[in-house]
Each structure stands twice: as C-alpha cells, then as structure tokens.
Amino acid sequence: MSVKVVTGDNDLVARKVCSEVGLLTEHTLLGVQIEEMTNEELAESAERTTLFARVSPAHKQRIIHALQSRRHTVGFIGDGINDAPALRAADVGVSVDTAVDIAKESADLILLEKSLLVLEEGVLEGRKVFANILKYIGMGASSSFGNMFSVLGASIFVPYLPMTPIQILTNNLLYDVSQTAIPTDEVDPEEIAKPRPWDMGSLAKFILFIGPCSSIFDYTTFLIMLYVFKAWAADKAALFQTGWFVESLLTQTLIIHVIRTRKMPFLQSRASGSLIAMTAVIMSVGVLIPFTPIGPYLGFTTLPPLYWLLLALTLLAYMLLTQGVKTWLIRRAWV
C-alpha cells in the first residue's frame, strides 16, 4: 500500500506539507506534464510518483484511472467541488461531513470523526463480517451436500422413510437456530490481515471434500441402527429415525467449530461465547427431545444406552476426519 497526494495547490506548498508528514516528494508530476502524457505514459509514471500538484479535476480522474489500469485498488479522500470526479472514479471515495454536497454525494464513505483510524476499524469490521459470511455459506452448503448423499443412500436399502418430513424440518430448524450466533463469532487475526476475494472455486472444493465426511458417519450410524439394534423391521422405524436424527443434528452443530477456523478448534482458536452457548443449547435439545413429551408427536423413541457410547465415538471420529481433510485442503492451498 502507498500514499499519494493529488492536489490543485502549488507544488512548493504541497512539498512543504508532505515533508512535514514524512512523505517523500522526489517523484512529482504537475498538471501541465500530465496534460502532455498519454494514458499509458501516465499509468507508468503514476506508480512511482508520490505528489501530483497543480492538477485539475479532470487530471485527478485520469490519475485514478491510470492507477486502476495497473490493477491497483484506489482510494481517494476529498472534500471540495474539484474532488467530485475523482471521488466517483475511485474504488473507494472518502469524504467528510463538512464537505460540499457534491463531494459527499460522490463519496462511498463519509467520515464523521477527524480520524482516519475510523477507516481502519471499518475495514477490519467489514473483513470480519465477510469471513463470517463465508463460514455460514461453507457450513450450510457442505452440510446440505452431505445430507443429500445420506438421504439418497438410506432411501435405497431402508424399507421405510429414513427420516419423516416433520423430523427433517425439526432438524433443519434446530440447525439453523444454532447458526444464528455466527455473526457474533470471533475471527482469527490472519483472516482479516489482508482482503479475501470471493473464490467460488475454493468454496466448491471445500463443499466437495468436507460435505461427504458427514455422509460417511451417517452411513456408519445407519449400519449401527440396522445391525447392532436390529432396526430392519417397519415397527423399528422410530428407533432408526431417532438415532439418525440425533446423530445428524449433533454432527452438523458440533462441526461448526471445526469449519469456522483454519486452526485447531477449541485449542488454537475458540469461538465466541454466544456461538459456544448456542451450540451447547441446540445439542442439548437434540439429546433430550426424544425423552420429552414432544418426542412421540415427532415420531421419536428412547434410545438404548449403548447408542450414546457409539454416538460419542462417532462425534470424535467425525471431528478428527473433518479436521484432517480441512488441514489437507489448506496445505494444498485449495481453500
């Protein structure tokens, strides 16, 4: 990142101001010199020039376009009528609340405080919001992708509905509620150290590799319910459905903590208190709902004690596998 001064003032005055704030002005361009340059010549000179003086509004706009042609992201700060074209041309136009109306209308941001640190705080907050949006999209898409394979496979060899519509809706409702705390989540410092572009390719790889991890343990749960607890018969449908409902909800909810960070969850990076609390509440609801009076209305039944031991092993194995796949994707620079 570099700072450049673009002003219509006299170059001697501008040099003095730049020297007082520590900006080197050995490379300076005047408006009359810019007038004689082609766009390509200006683009080449603008990259190494720190001070542009005695420039007109049209010159300011040309300078910004010249820098943008070299793939630079340009921000411009101005408060006068002459700054309006440049404010509109810049990638981010910044003005102040005391600026003229045309400057404020042309700007993207208006500072209400006399401090550029406000911009830094705003940028960092924006990066946090973007990082949390990516978390939500990655979690939701990978979960849905994995569940699609699970439902498809179970429907082939299970002689009844693997999960009833009301159970699927309840599962989705509880899972969605667990994710309402994502906007409050902490973001690792390295995630906001620099801008992160929207990369559909990385997201697709994430979904394709992380999504099927949940299906693996859905299928192990199917096998446990069918062969360990003998849930083949139609009168055992409630047992099978309850077992998969609890496992599906707990794996989806708990895995948020693995996906939300590129580090080791809980040890190297911890979620916000709100997200941890929401995860604990939803997982508790998932465990307790078969034992409540609401359970029979949703088609649930009580589960045998051995199921809970096998579920704990399933959750541990799922987290370890997902963490391993995530680390592998990061090392290959795919996400």
Image (spheres, rainbow, N blue to C red):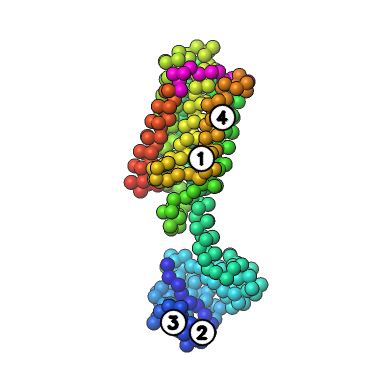
Residue 54, numbered circle:
2
Q: Quick one: SS at disc 4?
A: helix
What's the CA distance linking mark 2 and mark 3?
Answer: 17 Å
Task: Based on the picture, tell me whether residue 28 belongs to the magenta stretch.
Answer: no
Q: Which residue sits at x=39%, y=45%?
A: 268
- Whichever of callouts 2 and 1 sits on the residue coming sooner in the sequence is 2
Residue 285, numbered circle:
4
Residue receiving disc 3: 19
- Which span is picked out in magenta? 297-308
Q: Quick one: SS at disc 2?
A: loop
What's the CA distance linking mark 4 and mark 1?
Answer: 14 Å
Image position, residue 316 (x, y; %): 40, 31
Which amino acid type is shown beneath numbered disc 2?
Arg
Which amino acid type is shown beneath numbered disc 3?
Ser
Residue 276, numbered circle:
1
Q: From the viewer's perspective, is residue 170 above or below residue 53?
A: above
Q: Is residue 87 left or right of residue 25?
A: right
**Given this view, does label 2 or label 3 mark the residue nearer the observer?**
3
**Given this view, does label 3 or label 4 mark the residue nearer the observer?**
4
- Whichever of callouts 2 and 4 sits on the residue coming sooner in the sequence is 2
